[in-house]
Image: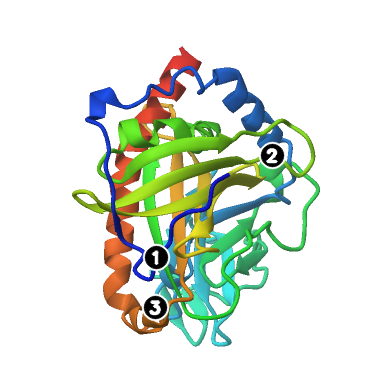
Amino acid sequence: MGPVNVRRWPVQLFKEPAWAKQEPTYRECAPALIEAAGKRASARPSGNWFVIGASREVRADRPFGSTVGGHELVAWRGEDGEVRIGPGACPHLGAPLADARIDRGGLVCRWHGLRLDGTRCGTWSPVPAHDDGVLVWARLDALGGEPPSDRPVVPERPAGGPSIDAVATLTGTCEPEDVVANRLDPWHGAWFHPYSFSRLRVLETPDGTEGSDRFLVEVTFRLAGRAGVPVHAEFLCPEPRTVVMRIVEGEGVGSVVETHATPLGPGPDGKPRTAVIEATIAASERPGFALAAKLAPAIRPLMRHTAARLWRDDLAYAERRYALRSG
């Protein structure tokens, strides 16, 4: 692997062929290779943990409603700031607790005033929750069907120094394995997303042995026109529903994009729905990044917009894969 040319200023001008004159990648992109990597990912333990949303979405002043695998959930923060998660239907008459109000750290149902403080109440019982600082996870043992774990498999993130994180969420008609398969196909990047990626080469593919189950790519993240940031990035699956892209050489080493695929359950048409919850955690050792981190509230919407644009395209890819796979 050749070194990435990182100058004092990381943005570099580059040359590239016209889109149709790129080197075709279909010969390298072997369907069996992607399928095998996906199967190995599906065999890894998850401890029955599912991402439900961004940490910032779960607040102390209003409930956060979600659905995982057909299970309606409600999440909120108690007076101690800790996340609480439980069934989304009131145990009295089934009112939606996502519409409840929060008072002194407890949920108060708006239908008849039943108060839930996060402990068991009749048939209503909380589920284990975990807040990793960027995302909130719920442990659903009946849905996962695996031996439970105390904590989810949270990917390694930038350690120390300033960072900026943003979370984008989109929904598609597919299953989590279709989302994972999309991310385990780095070859489509410069073809399907020419507005974001250029000069993409896959340098290393998994061979199935311990410690080498990753895709390594060389790619230039396009900023505008012929200006971009060249990096080397790896793609890994730490658990069945998560794919991590991590920069290993170039600007922003250690920065990660975590793609989490959470099954929602069937939609009105009976077909499965999956939420793509993508967390981008950017970091840099450059002195100017500390100033950028202070402007994070203004930068996060741009980060979410970039992720959403990519996933609007990639969900079409995942949905197409599901449609072909399911007949």
Label 1 vs label 3: CA separation? 16 Å
Foreground: disc 1 or disc 3: 1
**Residue 194 appears anywhere in the view:** yes
Q: Which mark is residue 136?
A: none
Vertical placement of residue 42 versus 258, above or below? above
Please state the horizontal and vertical placement of residue 321, each as a whole percent of the image: 44, 23
Instruction: Identify the amino acid type marked 3.
Output: Phe
Instruction: Identify the amino acid type marked 2.
Output: Asp
Residue that appears at 31% across and 80% down:
295
Residue closest to the eye, 13 or 137: 13
Vertical placement of residue 317 versus 294, above or below? above
Within-10-Å neighbours for mark 1: few <14, some 14–19, many 20+: few
How many numbered callouts? 3
Within-10-Å neighbours for mark 3: few <14, some 14–19, many 20+: some
Please state the horizontal and vertical placement of residue 78, each as a whole percent of the image: 55, 81
Q: Which mark is residue 213?
A: 2
**Residue 242 appears anywhere in the view:** no
Please state the horizontal and vertical placement of residue 103, each as a whole percent of the image: 45, 84
Label 2 vs label 3: CA separation? 32 Å
Residue that appears at 68% across and 43% down:
144
Label 1 vs label 2: CA separation? 31 Å
Question: Badge 1 is on which residue?
Answer: 7
Vertical placement of residue 171 versus 307, above or below? above
Q: Who comes first in sequence, dot 2 or dot 3?
A: 2
Q: Judge left or right: residue 295 versus residue 18.
A: right
Is disc 2 placed on a helix, strand or loop? loop
